[in-house]
Each structure stands twice: as structure tokens, then as C-alpha cells.
Image (tube, grey):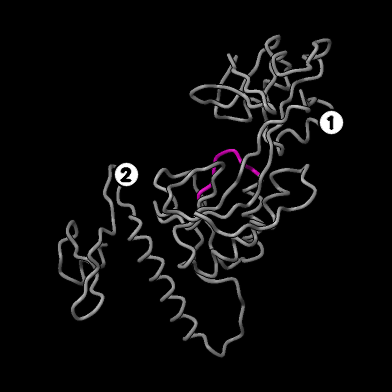
Amino acid sequence: MSEAARRTGVPLPTPEPPRLGPRRRARARLLERSTQGLSLTDAGARLFASAELLALALLAQAGAGRPRRGGGVGRLRISLPPHFEPLWRAIEGFGQRHPRRALTSSSPIAGGPAADGVDVAIRVGGGGRSTYVGRTLARYRHRLVAAPAYVAGVPLERPEDLGRLACACWRSAAPSWQLGDVAFALDPLLATNDYQHLLHLALRGRVVTELPPFLAHGPLARGELVEVLPAFPLPHQTVRALVADTRLLSPLIRHFLDFAAEHVPAALDPYAGSPAAPTPMAR
């Protein structure tokens, strides 16, 4: 913005849209100003992606005849949900495959993929606005778990039997678990947005709780936890990669989406037999 104001001689707070031709200008708001600073609008994100494609074309023209190294160019900016360590490892693996590409990550951003210059926003569930396009990377189930000593001698045949025990869960407006076809309303001992806290309470024999499979797998395999009511499984969670528009994706983003679709399923769910087949992008 500062460079555009300097070149055009326009004061920084009020730069005009870029000139697209002798008689055309972009008649759209490209930026939104808030207390956190400036962020791209949807139109701004599309223009920015187009500019990146133009830069890629110019680089390709300049590099014609040179040995191809693949993988795209530029910096990949990714927004991640918190506490999802397997996604850290997937990003690390992509960085090892493409060592010249700078990778950055951040916590979820309310504005979506276009906010703060994010290229790909990975979300659990239906996050994102309808203007964003999503690719399903994986589906997995949380496990309902407890310490063996905590549930020893307690008859647990139906979800209603959980009323005999203390429960802890992910924080929500109306805490409940959908166990098979039964919706079990909770009066939790603790509701939190930190799965490590839930794991800590379960290992100490304080509660029955839900854990994502990548956290539950180790303690279950070692016998530190047991699965509760396995005949009444929790519903599937969906992990999606959101982008502003698939028509404007750089090669580097496409490489990352293909890599994530291949590696994220097994990373998130050690119980999965094989990675899920990649799904097409959908709004």
C-alpha cells in the first residue's frame, strides 16, 4: 500500500483502485479496515491471486530453458486449528519435500482464507463462508474414553448409563454427545477447548471424555485408557482445506492440497486403514 501510494502520488489512506486499462478501473472494494488492520475482501483476494498467477507466468517465461525443479514458487501461508499436532507433522513433511518454499502457519482466522493473506485454511467441521471452496481431506471419529479403574464395576450398556459418572467435553453452548442414534445431554464436570486438558483428566481417572483418535491411540494401546460404549460411536468429524477460488490457485497451493489429501487422513486417525480418496473441491 505504501509503495502504491508513493508511485501514484496518492495519500496512503485513500489510494485508488489499480488501473486495468486505458478506460477501466477495478470498481470494487479490495481491502477492509478494522481495529486489527487491513484485510483483503473476496474481490481483493481474487485480484491478489490473479496477480500471483501473472507473477508465476513471468517467472516461467524468464526461466524458460532452465532445468525444471517443480513444486511451484513463493510462500505458502496456512491457517490451522489449534492443538492438531498431526497437521504440524504434515506441514513439516511438505516442507521437507519442498525445502525452497517458505511455509507459515497461524491459528484460525475469523475472516477466512482471504484474511491476513492466508492461502489455505484447514478447518474441522463446516467452518468458512459460502464464498470459499473446500476440499475434504479426512473424516474421523472422536473416541469416548476413560481410565480402566474409573469405569471398573460400572455397568455401561447404553448412553444413559453415563449419568453414573462424571464427564468432561469440548466446550459448546449446549454440551451433548451424539452417541450412535442417542443424543446424550451433558452436565459436564468440565467443558474446555483444550484436548490436552481432557486427556489429563481421563488419565487421572477423573472423567469419561472425548478425544480425537490421534490423542487417544497411544493411551488406549498402552492400556492407560479404555474405550467406553464402542457400540455407540460419536459422529464423524470432517477436515477440510478452504481456499478462496480453485480457478486462481498457484501450483504451490495445488501441490499442498494433493499432499495433504494423501497424508492427513492417516496422521489424524491411526485407526484408519488407508487414506481416504481425495474429494473434488466443493463450495
Q: Residue at x 58, y 68 (%)?
A: 100
The numbered dot on residue 188 is: none
Task: Find residue 35 and report its horizontal and vertical position in percent.
Answer: 28, 42
Residue 70 occupies quadrant: bottom right
Q: Residue at x 46, y 76 (%)?
A: 56
Real-space Cα separation, disc 2 to disc 1, in angstroms: 46 Å
Left or right: 149 in relation to 247: right
Amino acid type at image mark 1:
Arg
Q: Which residue is mark 2?
A: 36
81 in magenta: yes
Q: Write the start and end of the magenta stretch as one range.
A: 79-85
Q: Secondary structure at mark 1?
A: loop
Determine whether 263 is above or below 34 in the image.
below
Q: Secondary structure at mark 2?
A: loop
Q: Which residue is mark 1?
A: 222
Task: Find residue 107 and report its horizontal and vertical position in percent.
Answer: 49, 43
Residue placed most toward the observer, 28 or 53: 28
Q: Residue at x 78, y 52 (%)?
A: 274
Amino acid type at image mark 2:
Gln
**Tally of numbered tags:** 2
Task: Find residue 160 and report its horizontal and vertical position in percent.
Answer: 69, 14
